[in-house]
Amino acid sequence: MADNNNINLLNEKLKAKEAAERAKNQTGTDEPMKLDDAARVKVLSPARLVAKRFFRNKLAMVGLVILIILFAFSFLGSLVYPYSQFQKFTGTNKQDREYAVSGEPSSVYKYVIDGSDVSGGKDFVDSFIIEMEKNGDGTTSQVFSLGTEKYRLTKIYENLYTLSKTAGYAGKIDHLTGTIAEGTFDDEVAAELINTWNSRAKGDKDAVITIGGIEYMLVYGSKSSGTKIYSDYPEDQIKEGLLATSLVFDKASPDAPDISDDFRISALNALAGERQFTFEGKDYKIVNESGEELIEDAAGNVQFGISKYATRDELGQDTFDIDFKKTMVGIIDKIEAEGLREYNFTYNVPQLNPETREYEYDEDGNIVLQEEDLTVKRKEVAGEIRYHVQYLKNTEVYSLYEKPSWNHWLGTDGDGYDVLARIMYGGRISLIVGFVVVILETILGVIMGGIAGFFGGWVDTLIMRLVDIFYCIPTMPIMIIIASVFDKLKMAPYQRLLWMMGVLGVLGWSGIARLVRGQILSLREQEFMTAAEATGLKTGRRIFKHLVPNVMPQLIVSMTMGLGSVILMESTLSYLGLGVKHPYATWGNIINSVSDIEAMKSYVYIWLPVGLLISLAVIAFNFVGDGLRDAFDPKMKR
Amino acid sequence: MGKFIVKRLLLCVVIFFFAMFLIYTLIYNLPSSYVETTARELAAATSKMGGKTYQEWLEQLNADYGMNKGLVAGYFTWLGKALQGKFGDSWKWNMPCTEKFSKVIWNSFILGLISFIFEIIIAIPLGVIAARKQYSITDYTVTVISLVGISLPTFFIATVFKLIFAIRLKWFDIGGMHSRNFIASTATGWENFLDLAKHFFLPALTLIFLSIGGLMRYTRTNMLEVLNADYIRTARAKGLSESKVIGLHAFRNTLIPVVTLLGGTLPGLFSGAMITETLFSIEGIGYVSYQSMVGGDIPFTMFYLSLMSVLTLLGNLIADVLYAVVDPRVRVN
């Protein structure tokens, strides 16, 4: 009862005091607070104290803001940003596209007439033509000797020749019997031939005699083979053996079927003669229209064209219609007549699908035509004149190393990727690598340091010597060796990334182990540890639940600083081309892709922002780490 | 003192033994395809010039490195040879590793020494000033510069320097040891020196830029600690001038940890600056060993790694010994 009374008394007093204060506030008479008033001291929890000290540190705040921005940029930026890291960009570029090439054929076409034998002379037709045309005296017929055979080349039309065999094998004299063994000859001729043969001297190889205007040639041979007789053929036995021409057959339209050689022979013969012919029961006639000879059927439809110039597309295929070829003949004649080097004209060009190489058709089934400005360029290469028809075509190309623009704020890189997108995703990998490695280091370091510090004695000595050993192994060279081994093994980029993080973690734990051990050595002597031991806690629990949390401040500081140095290490390795590999982007390998001098000069807009980002990230981590250190231990100003 | 040094030395030997064993294990366990591919490539590249065949390279490696023996036996083979200074013939440079080392080490040393000297000249005064005016603008500037300095990637700052000084201003060459029109046979010693100095400028600048941060922070921290000490208050209390307090009492005490730190970095002058030398094509030990490591030159890599380990251990040893020597308050136990 007495207690209750007391409490009631106290409560009433408090109420009275509150009421008095309220009244004071309302009246506005503000009495200054007493110096020893308890309300003056605001008690903060240790964590809040640290936070307060941290947030007061300007540098740390700058670092924190930079870090928040960097993380948002790397991890959230891609949500807003329209491009992905593997998106290749293409642009159109006006490029000179070859549309067609015209020119005289570089060799003549030869059409062998069925049943004739001109095999010996066939291969020499070109040289015969050149030789005959070189005379320049308008000869239209000339006989060429080819060993024992003779061939006659006759010009029957402009650029159209026939080749006939005019002399050849006629018979044989048998050496044993001394008589004509093969072939039929008039008696006088035979006698004369035998005479000649009999009067041959030793070492003679052949003899030529003319009997009655006909030339005979004896080629002396051995006893077994006999002497062969060659003679001119009588004029009535000479047949046209081959048509040779530099004229080109043009299809009337790209879809027209190919023509047989027989048709060509008929057409060419008709061209030189009556300009009309019948082939397989159909009548055709030949009409000349502005330089191009057109073969029309009975209904007047153009079936084929014959022209001096072959006009073919860039692949050498005959894909043009006859109108274009006719136009080209006209243009080439004009160019030659006026001595031009270039000629411009417009033409309705059928649109060719670049992939299927087929014409594009509209809904009505007509070929899509588009008027294009075409340029004919006369080029002479190795004595052959070619007329190249070109037009400016919008061509789709990868936009490599494009300058910064509104579409690509930092331009595009050497693969046509958007640099800003690459930097975003690269930041992700760089930051993740940093975290993974630091966490790995810390786990290893805490375990080793914790065990060493807690147990002391020989365990401590052993672990600390291990720390010394790892401390003395240089990280960078080891990473370079391992990376060059990966290179030689051609390891997949992802696997390589994992390995790299693992190795970095294993090499980096010694510093943290030292720190943890040092702290724990002093902590374990304190009363709370004695208390923990007295309560009978297990060793593992004592280490990791009671000791390690007390090392947390130092751990957090060293992890933050460590993040910066791991990012630095990773970017240096990637810069050297030994870290994370293409196609994965990291900040380091983005710079690496423009590391040679020329690229460095020209693509400042690629490497400068990335370099700044790396620096900013590391600086920010160091600022924050520094701020945290100051906040955790205000006495230890570093 | 002598006992302490002997004890530390012995410990260093033990650590070296095991560290090298770890490194040897790594090299020993390199995929055999890697070693063979490298040897084959090497044989193919040098065969026309009368080089060794694939088999000879491997045999030589086995002889020097005991790769064909067991891990432990092989390690002792290598260690035995290495302790005699026989590190074998470098695969990439086609000469004994030690010979290549003695050819290039002075480039590294000079580069390191220049930046070391400038680092001290710049960083220590700045650190002292920052500590004296704690929380002033100067202090913040120094802190920011030092944090930025230790944060910048070497390749980035080197590239920026190249862009500014070599490409835009055209004051220096982008890399290399000599100008294009430099003819070694006709140049006088002075010309040679000038040309070298011109080419060492940018790498040295890079190294200085990157290293002053750490030393500056270290000096500042230690100076702050000293300035808060009782004896400084005493010095002030007895009416000493500020310059005497700072210059005589505070600075000399700050020097103790700083000298210790610097002493520890002295052996580092011989380890070269791998990234900087590579970026500027300075033929120092860093550049040469980078090329060796990338090219799979196992003998030179082993040599370089042993060198690095020895230098690191030596650095720690010197730091420890210096600490005991410089500061009489530290009692060695």
Image: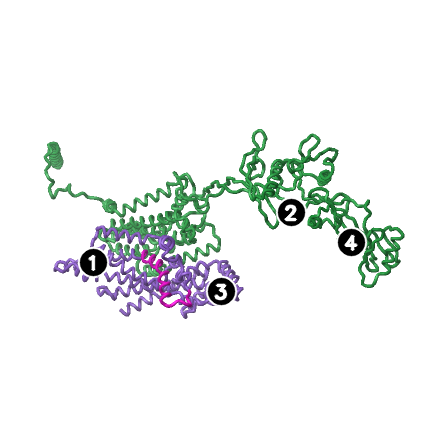
Q: Nearer the viewer, residue A281 or B66?
A: A281
Q: What chain is tagged by disc 4?
A: A
Q: Are marks 2 and 1 on the same chain?
A: no
Amino acid type of the residue that numbered disc 4 sits on in the rendered structure:
Thr
Q: Which residues are magenta?
A: B183-210
Which residue corresponds to mark 2?
A106
Q: Nearer the viewer, residue B97 or A166?
A: A166
The chain whose colour is purple is B
Q: Nearer the viewer, mark 4 or mark 1?
A: 4
Magenta stretch: dominant SS? helix
CA–CA distance in space, label 2 to label 3: 67 Å
Amino acid type of the residue that numbered disc 1 sits on in the rendered structure:
Val
Q: Is residue A229 visible?
A: yes
The colour with which the image depicts chain A is green
CA–CA distance in space, label 1 to label 3: 58 Å
Give the image location of residue A174, x and y in percent. 86, 57
Which residue corresponds to mark 3?
B68
CA–CA distance in space, label 2 to label 1: 96 Å
Disc 2 to disc 3: CB gap under 8 Å: no
